Image (spheres, rainbow, N blue to C red):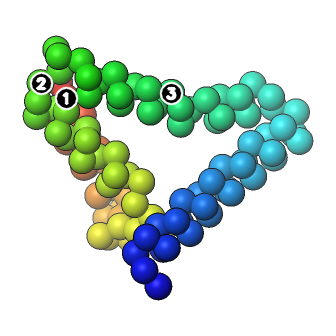
Amino acid sequence: MSVWLSLGIAFAAMFALWLLLVAVLLLLGRRRDARDVVRFIPDCIVLFKRLLRDPRVPRRAKVALALLVPYLALPFDLIPDFIPVAGQSQRRSRTSRAAQAAW
């Protein structure tokens, strides 16, 4: 299986789970929560675009943000999340380092 096919399947699965979450929230009568979930990804995309275009943001922060987005979107980790502490702390530490670079 090619890498692109694997990534396509992973993104399709994530999109299907996202739609399922929205549908469950709507069925439970939590329309506001469903609306927030629907708006979250587009809001993040707009935020990252604006940060990358803003001349006041240092270049190292832009590079950190540009590298962080694909890293967070990857369907696999260097250290899997099912390892109790190490798996989840890896993502947190990389995300916090990118946020620190932005400040």
Determine contact: label 2, label 3, CB under 8 Å.
no
Measured as percent of width and height from the top left, residue 35 is found at 71, 28
- In three-dimensional space, the C-alpha distance between marks 2 and 3, rounded to whole angstroms, equals 22 Å
Image disc number at residue 57:
none
In the rendered view, tell whether residue 40 sits above or below residue 64: above
Q: Which residue is identified by label 2?
A: 58
Give the quadrant of residue 16: bottom right
Position of 92 with respect to 42 (left or right) is left
Residue situated in front as seen by the camera: 18 or 83: 18
**Other residues around mark 3 within 10 Å, as few (<14) / some (14–19) / many (≥20):** few
Front position among marks 1 and 3: 3
Determine contact: label 1, label 2, CB under 8 Å.
yes
In terms of secondary structure, where does tag 2 sit? loop
Q: Please name the residue shown 19% across and 40% down the image.
A: 64
Visible residue check, residue 83? no
Residue situated in front as seen by the camera: 8 or 71: 8
Give the quadrant of residue 62: top left
Image disc number at residue 43:
3
Q: Amino acid at mark 3?
A: Asp
Q: Residue furthest top?
A: 56
In the rendered view, tell whether residue 4 sits above or below residue 45: below
Give the quadrant of residue 87: bottom left
Q: Which residue is identified by label 1?
A: 102
The mark that comes first in sequence, 2 or 3, is 3
In terms of secondary structure, where does tag 1 sit? helix
In the rendered view, tell whether residue 68 sits above or below residue 11: above
